[in-house]
Image (cartoon, rainbow, N blue to C red):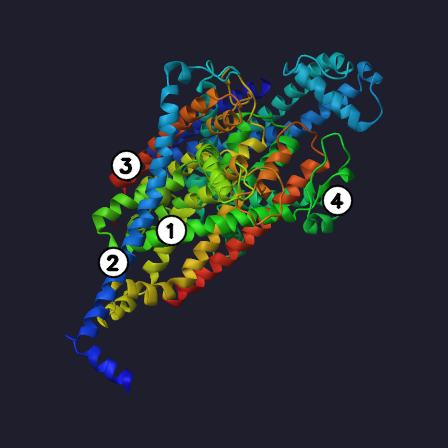
Amino acid sequence: MSSAAQLGAVTRWTGAAMRSRLRRRYRSERIFKLLGLGAVGLSLAFLAFLLLTMLWRGFGGLSLHFLTASDSTDPALAGVWGALKGSFLTIVVTMLLAFPIGVLSAVYLEEFAPRNRLTDVIEVSINNLAAVPSIIFGLLGLAVFLNVMNLPRSAPLVGGMTLALMTMPVIVIAGRNAITSVPPSIRDAALGVGASRMQVVFHHVLPLALPGILTGTIIGMARALGETAPLLMIGMRAFITTPPGGISDAATVLPVQIFLWSDEVSRAFVQKTSAAILVLLVFMLLMNGLAIYLRNRFERRW
Amino acid sequence: MTVTTALVAILLIAAAVGGASYLRAVRLRRQSRLHSLPIYHGVHAVLWSIAPALLVLAAWAPLETRLVDQAVLATPEARALPASPSQRAQILSEARQIAHREIVGGFSPLSRPLAPRILDSERDYGLLGVAAALLAALAGAAFQIYQSRRRAAEFRARASVEKWMNALLLTASLIAIFTTLGIILTLLVESLRFFDLVPPGDFLFGAQWSPPAASQPASSGAFGSIPLFWGTIFIGAIIAMIVAIPLGLMSAIYLTQYANPKLRALLKPLLEILAGVPTVVYGYFAALTIGPAVRSLGLTLGLHASSESALAAGLVMGIMIIPFVSSMADDSIAAVPSAMRDGSLALGATGSETIRQVLLPAALPGVVGGILLAVSRAIGETMIVVMAAGLAANLTANPFASVTTVTVQIVQLLTGDQEFDSAKTLAAFALGLVLFLITLALNLVALTVVRRYREAYE
């Protein structure tokens, strides 16, 4: 009886109960919206806090000497050039291996692979590899590249190979997305004028998909550049006072250098570590910016 | 050195044969219609000269090491070597490093006189390998010339080149399978060797983790992995998720449902930066700033607190995961048919009521799948926990105490100097195997959930 009366009061649009009820609902609506904004704001505030902390601690450590010197036990003399060069060599090896292999696999899976068990196994492996923790790749590199193949320890060659195995699935997945987004009419037209399937892919589909593939590749490379754990496994934590001369010399990379300096007891290394982090973040930002630029400039919506 | 010369020579042969084939096809085209463009004739010739030679070189490299070892062991200088094969192998590898000037002297005085012998026989066998590779290149080139001459203008060079390309594409795809197999095999083999030393039951169900010092035998330490897995779950699946799920979910809701397109275009990439920051940076930040703050908080609360704590590592890891949870939630909410949202709004529900009572329940399987993927990523994360969570294997639920994780211990066991076959290094592979299996299972479950759910709405 009373609930029916309440209902009657509520359904009258102008009733006091209805008004207070609506007020409550609108208030919870506003609170919910504020919670959402708060979540975004909190996350971004943390990011700002992190960046400002690093700037505050490390900006004073940035100098020409810091950028051109190599590691040293004396914090006043230590610099990042050796680590930067090691990172550069490692990334070059990674790209030379992962890019062609990734693009060719993507082409095969999207354009040529027959529907059979083998193709399924390849697809499952690639999707799984993309989710395997990076440290497992380090274990693989240690066991296979160092202990079975006897490649030089601590070398950018081995580091690059390990990171290439890790980055390759990322490139394959990005490549497949880019290739599927090329409309079939392009393929049909090329086939129609007598091109072979191989010519269709390499003369028409791949050039059109290239911006998308490059965007994915750069993002994968940026991740490889910031990767630390697998490189620790293969011993790229050597203390090196001269920059590596080639891909088979012992080397260290920037993230590992940061890790090593963060372990130093001397307070002066706090500034060095933060400055090295700033250098690393600048490179990450440049690469990601390049990827976004490529995407906006060249990606076509069909 | 010899390999470089060989490669240059092979390339020269390939260029000469390829060029000749190309020019010949161009000449042929003046007289009759060619089946394939001249460039395919050229490429076909290059492939046939390079591929066999490269195969020979690749096969020769491991063979050469073995032949050199045999030859060196047969020299008079090797008489003095001890009989045990493992000692011999060690001295040989020292001698090889001396010969290549990687080290100045070895542990064993016997290795130095062997170095010049190694250089000698490496030169001899190197030359032999180069000769074989060159022969292969020439044979391949000759075969190609014979093939194309015989059929002249009708020679289907393009079809043949495309077969090579197809093989290349397939090979590139197979690398993914080989990598997966490589991971599984190495982890399995090394883990089985570890389980020879330590019973699997002690490893999986033991509650004490204290690996022996380098010189001690395996039996003097304890390899019970329960504390490590507890630490991993505590940090990665509990603390990090308490941070990441509400923040990630609410961010996704705000960005997809409330923010206007301009704001969204600005905020979303900013949020993605959180996922792009290298983990070593997060780790350092956690150790430098969050760790001490968490410690003083813990001490004010009167709890046992250390500067390396589960809470510091978990908090920072949670923040790293936010964009990941957010984009998974974003996808799942976007997959809910808009008719459901419109229907709810049309009945008079407010935006938040629609989200909480219609969209989220409908998107739940997708969100749960995304969270499982996030957990699997958090569990495998290494640098944050290495730098902020500590090394002490405590079985505690106090978030201010130091705990250790599987990944921390893998790093700990494998860095520092030790021989490869000790129980400690093998334990790292056993931990890696369990970690691999857990993340694999989480990913499979998550992907199945997400796929089922997508199908339900299609």
From the image, tell me which residue sits under label 2: A30
From the image, tell me which residue sits under label 1: B248
Task: Answer yes or no: are tags 3 and 2 on the same subunit.
Answer: yes
The residue at the far left in this view is A14
Q: Is residue A149 left or right of residue A179?
A: right
Q: Hey, what amino acid is under mark 4? A: Val
Give the class, few, some or many, for how many residues have Cα within 10 Å of label 1's Cα (few <14, many ≥20): many
- Residue depicted at x 45% and y 54%: B371
Determine whether B324 is above or below A59 in the image. below
- Label 2 lies in what chain? A
**Position of residue A57 measured from the top left corner of the image (x, y, whole percent):** 39, 26
From the image, tell me which residue sits under label 3: A293
Q: Hey, what amino acid is under mark 1? A: Gly
> Mark 1 and mark 4: span between their CA atoms?
42 Å
- Find out whether the residues at labels 2 and 1 contact each other: C-beta distance under 8 Å: no
Determine whether B26 is above or below B263 in the image. above
> Mark 2 and mark 4: span between their CA atoms?
59 Å
Task: Answer yes or no: are tags 3 and 1 on the same subunit.
Answer: no
- Label 4 lies in what chain? B
Q: Hey, what amino acid is under mark 3? A: Tyr
Q: Hey, what amino acid is under mark 2? A: Arg
- Residue depicted at x 44% and y 19%: A81
Which circle, 3 or 2, is nearer the viewer? 2
> Mark 3 and mark 2: span between their CA atoms?
36 Å
Which circle, 3 or 4, is nearer the viewer? 4
Of residues B58 and B201, the one drawn nearer to the viewer in this rendering: B201
Element at badge 3?
helix
From the image, tell me which residue sits under label 4: B198
Element at badge 1?
helix
